[in-house]
Image: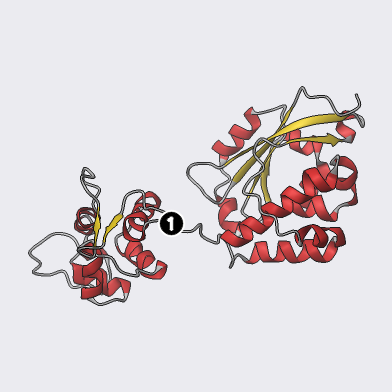
């Protein structure tokens, strides 16, 4: 059983026993978050002749579409079956930051919120000049930036030189499975590339069951690559490819096999992006 890192349940009183958390108790946080929201900025809320500052419990309950009694249980730190929809509406009403929303979930239900299903267009907006400068600074190693569905929303010049076909395809997984050149250029294609990649797709599908881009990616790969279906039916899951040692045989290297180590990162400011770099390794190909 998963033990909440901050919100251990006290079954004797039906409350969240947070102990001495130095101001991190759920009741204290919710009260503080309510006080900092100006009711005059929210359409439909009466604010004349108020005695206190910020929102009332009734305000938050109304904005969240619940009764004051139900919201009051949350602010008292009482245990209940709080839904994701309810906690998200509370987060919106209180104008919580991403970090604050995560703490709300941890304290209220014992675990952080699931990653949101984010459209590719939203992720593309986060590919800014700072991130581009970072991946450019990693030259001569090829680096791409992808969204949740492996659409390439950024790359450096080395990535374009190493994998021009993948850059034109603009999706890392579609190129790997649907392009004939990928099977020639990715050495030991099935075991070193296809199996772990399909494991990553299955893992992300589990994390984002409503993400339409991921659903279409799965559909297109399984329909367009018969051997992918056979591998898919192994029901393997892989959370990331960081640290994997693989080999490529590219026109850029004049057909010479090159061992590469995968480095996979996520910017701390976004759970929508992946930064994937291939670092040339000193390991020699088998038989050399």
Q: Quadrant of the N terminus?
A: bottom left
Q: Quadrant of the C terminus?
A: top right
Which residue was labeled with disc 1? 1
Q: Is residue 150 visible?
A: no
Residue 150: x and y, percent?
Answer: 68, 52
Q: Is residue 230 visible?
A: yes
Residue at 79% across, 43% down: 192
Residues packed near mark 1 inside 10 Å, few (<14), some (14 to 19) or many (20 plus):
few
Image check: 192 left or right of 31?
A: right
Question: Measured along the vertical axis of the image, is residue 147 above or below residue 44?
Answer: above
Question: Measured along the vertical axis of the image, is residue 27 above or below residue 60?
Answer: above
Residue at 62% across, 51% down: 147
Q: As rendered, which of 212 and 22 lies closer to the eye?
A: 22
Count of marks overlaid on the render:
1
Instruction: Name the colour scheme.
Output: secondary structure
Question: Measured along the vertical axis of the image, is residue 150 above or below residue 216?
Answer: above
Image quadrant where residue 251 sits: top right
Question: Measured along the vertical axis of the image, is residue 29 above or below residue 12?
Answer: above
Image check: 280 left or right of 15?
A: right
Image quadrant where residue 130 sits: top right
Image check: 269 left or right of 180?
A: left
Residue at 36% across, 54% down: 106
Residue 223: x and y, percent?
Answer: 82, 66
Residue 224: x and y, percent?
Answer: 84, 63
Q: Secondary structure at mark 1?
A: loop
Image check: 57 left or right of 285?
A: left
Q: As rendered, which of 16 and 12 lies closer to the eye?
A: 12
Residue at 67% across, 66% down: 215
Residue 285: x and y, percent?
Answer: 85, 28
């Amino acid at each position: 059983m998963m033990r909440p890192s901050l919100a251990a349940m006290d079954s004797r009183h039906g409350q969240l026993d947070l102990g001495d958390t130095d101001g991190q108790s759920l009741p204290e946080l919710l009260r503080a978050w309510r006080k900092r929201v100006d009711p005059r900025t929210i359409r439909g809320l009466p604010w004349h002749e108020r005695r206190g500052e910020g929102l009332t419990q009734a305000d938050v309950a109304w904005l969240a579409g619940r009764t004051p009694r139900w919201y009051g249980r949350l602010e008292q730190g009482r245990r209940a079956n709080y839904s994701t929809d309810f906690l998200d509406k509370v987060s919106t009403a209180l104008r919580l930051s991403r970090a604050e929303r995560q703490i709300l979930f941890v304290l209220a239900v014992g675990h952080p919120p699931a990653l949101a299903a984010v459209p590719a267009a939203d992720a593309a907006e986060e590919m800014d000049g700072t991130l581009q400068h970072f991946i450019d600074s990693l030259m001569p190693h090829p680096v791409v930036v992808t969204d949740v569905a492996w659409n390439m929303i950024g790359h450096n010049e080395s990535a374009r030189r190493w994998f021009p076909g993948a850059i034109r395809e603009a999706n890392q997984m579609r190129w790997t499975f649907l392009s004939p050149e990928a099977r020639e250029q990715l050495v030991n294609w099935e075991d070193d590339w296809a199996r772990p990649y399909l494991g990553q797709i299955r893992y992300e599908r589990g994390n984002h069951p409503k993400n339409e881009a991921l659903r279409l990616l799965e559909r297109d790969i399984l329909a367009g690559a018969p051997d992918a279906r056979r591998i898919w039916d192994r029901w393997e899951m892989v959370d990331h490819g960081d640290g994997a040692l693989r080999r490529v045989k590219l026109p850029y290297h004049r057909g010479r096999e090159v061992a590469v180590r995968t480095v996979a990162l996520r910017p701390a400011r976004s759970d929508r992006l992946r930064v994937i770099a291939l670092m040339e390794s000193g390991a020699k190909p088998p038989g050399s």
